[in-house]
Amino acid sequence: MPSAAELRQIAEQPLDPNTPQSYEIRERQQLEQPSETQRPASATNAPTNEDYEPNPSASIELDPERQQIVDSILRLYSGSGNHEEGSTGEKDMRVYAKQAVYDDVWSYCDTRYKIAGQWYGIPAVMKSSETKVIEIVCSTPSPDSPGTGTKPGEIVFKMKRAWTPKLLQKTYDVNHFVTLSMEKAMEGDGEGPSERVKYHKDQWNEKDYSHEGLGKVMKTLNGHFATIGTRPPKSL
């Protein structure tokens, strides 16, 4: 087990400047989530922000491969990351690049293996996780060559999920705003689709979250050490 000093050293490491960070993809999220002064009080005070409420009738169509990528992500949200025979979790994880980033309210992970540590933890803490409705907001193409410095492609979707924690035995509906930054697959990414998720940001119920101070420390530690308990496949 790492010492307290080692944990602090890990958590305080600077973010990789070559990895797209959340503030670089906030422009679209801000368009979907205008400031409080631009919204009625009923929207601002709603338990699930109306700007994050998915509208399936407004959803755009994805090409077949991108639809398969989104389907894999949705299966991971629903608990496909498990060690049962016939599970699709390991295959679903292949939609991520080897050096992908996952960023949500609880964790910050900077490799596919660490991301798997989060997904493989869902069956341990959740009785169920159900996709209720989804709206694909946009889909933009990836650059032809990875690492060229051009703007990555994106898949952006809104999703309502019903989460039921095992300990609480109560179901909570949560609106998610998910941004997937996409790049063409590289040799080190291994088997999988021709495009991979390079950065996965998930915001809940209009809330953004800190990338500084204690918030960053806790998110980084969770991302770094979750794999110890959840034991995702080493092949990832």
Image (tube, rainbow, N blue to C red):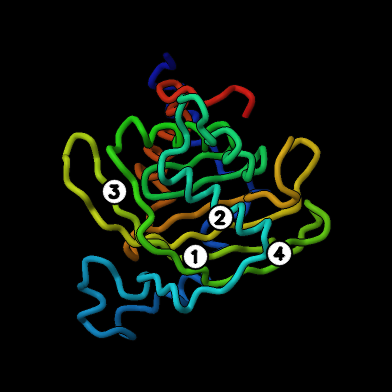
The residue mark sitting in front, 3 or 4, is 3
Categorize mark 4 by other alpha carbons within 10 Å: few (<14), some (14-19), many (20+): some
Choose the circle earlier in sequence order: 1 or 2.
2
Q: Residue at x 20, y 80 (%)?
A: 42
Look at mark 1 in the image and give the residue it sits on. Answer: 157
Disc 2 element: helix
Question: Residue 55 at x, y = what percent?
Answer: 40, 74
User: Gap in Å between the C-alphas at discs 4 and 2?
Assistant: 20 Å
In this view, the residue farthest toward the front is 86
Q: Quadrant of residue 16?
A: top right
Find out whether the residues at labels 1 and 2 contact each other: C-beta distance under 8 Å.
yes
Disc 4 element: loop
Label 1 is placed on what type of residue?
Phe
Find out whether the residues at labels 4 and 2 contact each other: C-beta distance under 8 Å.
no
The residue mark sitting in front, 1 or 2, is 2
Q: Quadrant of the C terminus?
A: top right
* Left or right: 109, with 61 as reference point: left
Look at mark 2 in the image and give the residue it sits on. Answer: 70
Q: Residue at x 52, y 29 (%)?
A: 86
165 to 45, vertically: above or below? above
User: Gap in Å between the C-alphas at discs 1 and 4?
Assistant: 19 Å
Q: Residue at x 62, y 57 (%)?
A: 181
Label 4 is placed on what type of residue?
Lys
Disc 1 element: strand
Label 2 is placed on what type of residue?
Val
Find out whether the residues at labels 1 and 4 contact each other: C-beta distance under 8 Å.
no
Find out whether the residues at labels 1 and 3 contact each other: C-beta distance under 8 Å.
no
Look at mark 4 in the image and give the residue it sits on. Answer: 151
The residue mark sitting in front, 4 or 2, is 2
Question: Residue 175 at x, y = what percent?
Answer: 34, 62
Look at mark 3 in the image and give the residue it sits on. Answer: 163
Choose the circle earlier in sequence order: 4 or 2.
2
